[in-house]
Image (cartoon, rainbow, N blue to C red):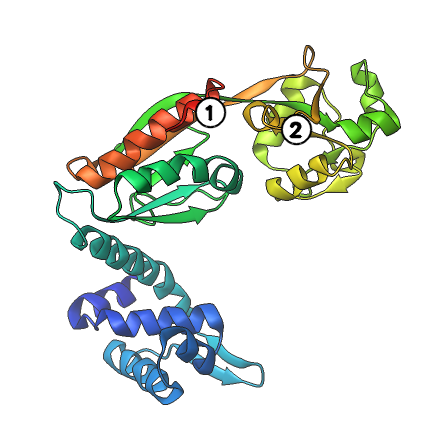
Amino acid sequence: MVDIQKRMAAIEPAWDLYRTLLAVLEHGSLSAAARVLGLTQPTVGRQIEALETQLGLPLFTRSQTGLLPTDAARALRPQAEAMRANAAALLRLAQGSADEVRGAVRITVSEMVGIELLPPLLTPLREQHPLLVLELVLSDQLQNLLQRDADIAVRMSPPTQDALLAQKVGTVGLGLYAHRDYALRHGLPQRLDELAQHALIGFDTELPYIRRLREQLSLPLNRDEFAARCDNTLAQLALLRAGFGIAFCQHGIAARDPALLPVLQAEIGFGFDTWVVMHEDLRGSRRHRVVFDALLQGIKKHLNGEDDKIE
């Protein structure tokens, strides 16, 4: 690994060659990488050969199943991904000056927040600033702001890196809910021990925060207890809205649908602190600050039950 880094520092191949390497690693063949990059397959092949020559390392071996990356190619991948993120961040910064609201701002949020909350919040922001371009990364995985995978993040946990500007906006409350149709067919549990008699919607893969919830709430949050299992929170919400069974839902989202009925709210309730986070280097950029402040204001209103006042 150290030898590879020394070679990179000495030779410094062009970024285009690393971009091609990433495309082949991600898509598995020269032809697939060529389609993604808008190049011909021979061009992609020549760029891979050029990178191998400049580094003095083989990056791929051919097999019956296609190209197989060598250990050297796999070792280079994290650095190449960081280069791609930095190149994208430089492009976003170059699209507008620091004192105007013009150009791209990349926001990373969970799928639930990105689909259920952000659209009505970002629409008036774009109307107010028509030269603003918003890039959304919807993922329940934490994006690395220090490596500039995104400019701004909405997170359900406090950031741990010192180079980030973070502000807590409140707590996202969650509880159990059921659709009115489900309640008409099966009734609703009146005690905690009655939950096991109902169709529960839950996770497929147990994550650390789920174990903490089970310990705190003394609930049957074991995978085997669920009638439907899925790690995608949007799919869980869709099942809840279809009347499949009982599931956890954010209070603010459930409040928008009068057909969603609270279940055992006096016994069960918890929340996640919510933060809006930005790389401190963007503090002086007006367009980033405008988006940061809009997220702060909009999410605070949502958490206070004032969605209809978001303007």
At 68% from the left edge and 24% from the top edge, which residue is drawn?
A: 176
The structure residue drawn at horizontal position 37% and vertical position 29%, both measured from the top left corner, is 311
Name which quarter of the figure residue 145 lies in. top left
**Residue beneath disc 1:** 308
| Mark whose residue sits in front, 1 or 2 | 1
Q: Position of residue 235 (x, y in %)?
A: 65, 44
Q: Does any portion of residue 279 appear in the rendered image?
A: no
Please state if 182 lies on the left or on the right of 147 as rendered: right
Mark 1 packing: few (<14 Cα in 10 Å), some, or many (20+)? few
Residue that badge 2 annotates? 248
Q: CA separation, marks 1 and 2?
A: 23 Å
Farthest residue to the bottom: give it.
Answer: 42
Expressed as whole percent of the image width and height from the top left, the position of residue 294 reads 32, 31
Query: Residue 20's image quarter?
Result: bottom left
Please provide percent x and percent y for residue 262. 69, 20
* Amino acid at dot 1: Asp
Observer-nearest of 237 and 129? 129
The answer to which of 202 and 77 lies nearer the viewer is 202
Q: Nearer the viewer, residue 310 or 282?
A: 310
Above or below for 42 versus 90: below
The one nearer the camera, 75 or 39, is: 39
